[in-house]
Image (cartoon, coloured by chain):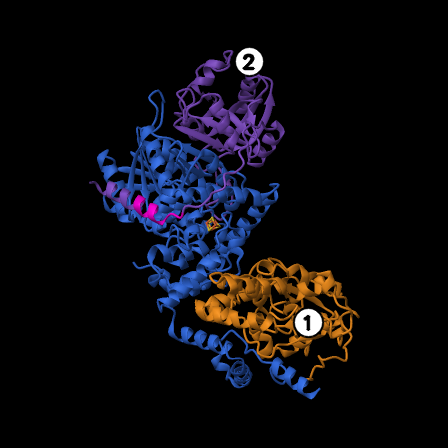
Amino acid sequence: MSNSDRARSQILNTLKRQAKPMAVDQPALQVELQWGQQESFQNQLKSNGADCERVADSVAALAAVDALIKRNGWHPLPVIAPGLLQKVQLANRWDSIHTEVTEAGTVAVSEAYCGIADTGSLVCLSSPDNPTSLNFLAEHHVVFLPGHRIVAGKRDVWKLMQAEGIHTPRAINLISGPSRTADIEQTIQLGAHGPRSLTVFLLDQLNP
Amino acid sequence: MKGPTPDSFRANAEHALQDATLQHALGRAQSGFVAKRAHAIAMVDDFEQLKQRAQAAKSRALANLAPLLEQFEASVVASGGQVHWASTTGELNQQVIDICNGVGAHRIIKGKSMIGEEAGLNAAMEHAGFELVESDLGEYIIQLAQEPPSHIIAPAIHKTRQQVAELFKQFHELGDRGLTQISDLVNEARQVLRSAFLTADVGITGANLLIAENGSICIVTNEGNGDLSASLPAVHIVVASIEKVVATMDDASDILEVLARSATGQHMSAYTSFFNGPKREADAGGPKQFHIVLLDNGRSDLLGGPFESILSCIKCGACLNHCPVYTNVGGHAYGWVYPGPMGSVLTPLLQGLKATTPLPNASTFCGRCEAVCPMGIPLPQMLRTLREQQHDMALDNLPWRAGLGFYSWLSLHPRLFNRFARWIRMGLKITPRWLWPRHRQAVQPQGTTTFLAQWQHRKTKT
Amino acid sequence: MQDSTPNKTKSDKAAPRVALYVTCLVNTLRPQIGFACVQLIERLGFRVEVPATQTCCGQPGYNGGLRQQAMAIARQQIALLEPFDHVVVPSGSCAGMMINHYPELLKQDLSWLQRSQALAGKTLELAQFLDQHHWQPDSPPPPHHRRTWAHHTSCSCRRETRSHQCAESMLQLAGYELAELQDQAVCCGFGGSFAAKFDALSSRMGRNKLNQVADCKATGVVSADLGCLLHLESLAGMTGLSGLAEKGTQDFLHVAELLAACQEPQQSSSDVPTS
Ligand code: SF4
């Protein structure tokens, strides 16, 4: 018997012995999936230090990304998540496109599964199409989210995933703002380890 | 080097009160946390309801801890991960070391983990020859300083920017770059730690929650360091204590509603992530191995007893931020990894009452901790119960024990009690100045005699 | 509650009986607070009685881990106080002990539990009692009390009896000017035996409070708990913060004293033997 096994039976036995079975009230289940308001999503997200803008489609969004890059002097070539790259029309906007963050100062563009209105959070599911590292390694993070995919609260995310038959992926990242730290003198600094900025485009539709 | 211990709290506290740099750092911190939390709570319609839901989720979990842990284990295994169990912190450290040795690892990147702190994991790993780097900025700072954390969510809250700059100067190759701004310091750490992330063989993180229904672990951070530690290295090891398990993603959601609001005053931290098993076959990134080491360290004994609800603690830190003792002396005075009210309860329970006697006594019972605790943990009552246990074990100091015993006995004998009250009045009048604490003025009784004596006197007159 | 409000005649034998539980600190150190309480409650038309065998609510032992002794004290005080219609306590701390902690202490014994709950149901902190029975001042604050007061809401009034707002509104009703004291919810550092066991820490907390009193330009401190007042007063003397007001006037007063000062003295059982 390994140490782990011994510890396992010891812990579980103690717990079973000590546990006081008690009647636990199950909360009233709210069965229906609740959708959320775009406006509240936007407000919350902004209060977390992110930018959020509504655009017509991915063409407009990509043009906006380009403008952002130029305006801020960011790395000229964005990294685009493979899944997104397949769906959108790049219209030769950039000559070469990476799908992996290799250089410092890159801008990563990825797609969120849905948004949460209550807290202004993006829900990003990891997949071959949407690697987790894109969300954290880039200097600036741009996220596309179809504007109609905003649910009310966290519980609704799990309902939506269930309804759409999505199995638990390796990573579910709820992203509610750019990376930040207040570890030195309680002063908030953006860009601790992850992206220094987070820009969300709410798309009315994917392609024109 | 022997640092402060729980047993020397009184001296630690006095030392802390004299430390001007520490006082400066603490003064800044306190108001920030309190105001941010108040604001976050004012922003929601009904925080009490959110609290109740979170508490209900946790009570359900505690009532079913064993079956939930078994379910969690099965779910983790089903998603391709491995679960290890540890009764003691020594076992936890050994298991982590064994896993690392098993994969031939050398460099370790670590996300913040209070269980890691509790177990002294860093020291154990360094002793075993691993190169370990903390990635949470605050943890990184105190790792350089070789100090324990002084706050459960802001480990380096006791450090000023000048002290951090000094540390970086000492340990980084800065050349003649001077780091004066906080933004410079954060950027410097970002650069140095980025390469540590990219070259690490193993990532170790803690977990805020374990979800039984699907075997996910939840990590909440603002920096994103936990996510990088969990995603970049080939092996991800999670260290967590057994009471972190909840039944469902819904229950986890309910607890998350109160966590960030109580902790940093955000409605959500920047990153709340659920990790589930190793990378899927087609995934481009993610660890190839996923391990969870579950630690008991005495927690299972607390279930079903008077201290059960301390297992509901979600380590938000609100009780620290609102504690008049913590905010005046900081975390190191408590002598171990858990400070403030939750620490004064948990430390004696995990380390024994004998070595921690001052902690339960270091409270005015002002009750603010309980008032702000999102999990409704009756911290003052628990401290009182610990005092009762100390008394039963004769751990309280003799003069106090005798004094309180005598006063309680007097309280049962009204005539003597009142005579005694009159003696006290006399005594106070004649007590020489030097018998009073230096910085206090003697309290003088007023009036001719006690209230009861005056009242009696008047009654008999009429 | 309304039906128990008596006619305003103190001699009325049918008037509801109020037991005044003065607390050990008031009894020993500031008897005039007790007399102020009597005046205030009698003005509302109640018959005030002071059970002669009252001692201490048992809190020192209870908070010091002496549970058995605290239980014995609790039972004795309950037996003493239960014949009365109301029990009034000029301290959030002692009132909170009776209201919240006696039932906790005696929860194992059903009959005592019920008796403790009955007592809890008729026990009120002074300001709460005055508020519920619509106390009114007769006159504005006397000249020597006309200044800006910092109201220190004790932690027990705030979190045990939840009556800190009653004191605030009573003081305002009486015409007192209250300063905007910052961090009112923060403890002053008294905490009973805490002040002795951790003297340096307790003093620091008290001085923080006094600094805030000075910051808000108050020249006196009023509180519903004598423990806090004595603690602060003993520190103020040594920090150069005393003498906030002119000489000869006291800086640290109980809510009862300030309120009673706005009431015409009555020829009553409360004739204060001058001190
Ligand atoms: S005891 Fe309550 S307030 Fe303190 S850290 Fe735990 S959950 Fe937060």
The quarter of the rendered structure image containing the N terminus of chain A is top left
Give the chain coloured purple. Answer: A
Residues at discs 1 and 2 both on one chain? no
Question: Foreground: C31 or C217?
Answer: C31
Mainly helix, strand or loop, the magenta region? helix
Work out whether C258 lies above or below B144: below
Name the residue at 59% across, 28% down. Answer: A36
The circle on residue C156 is none
For mark 1, name the chain: C
Where is residue A116 shown, x and y percent of the image?
Answer: 54, 30
Give the chain coloured orange. Answer: C
Where is residue C47 shown, x and y percent of the image?
Answer: 71, 74
Mark 2 residue crowding within 10 angstroms, few (<14) / some (14–19) / many (20+) = few
The quarter of the picture where residue B360 lies is bottom left
Which stretch is magenta? A12-20
Tell me the colour chain B is drawn in: blue
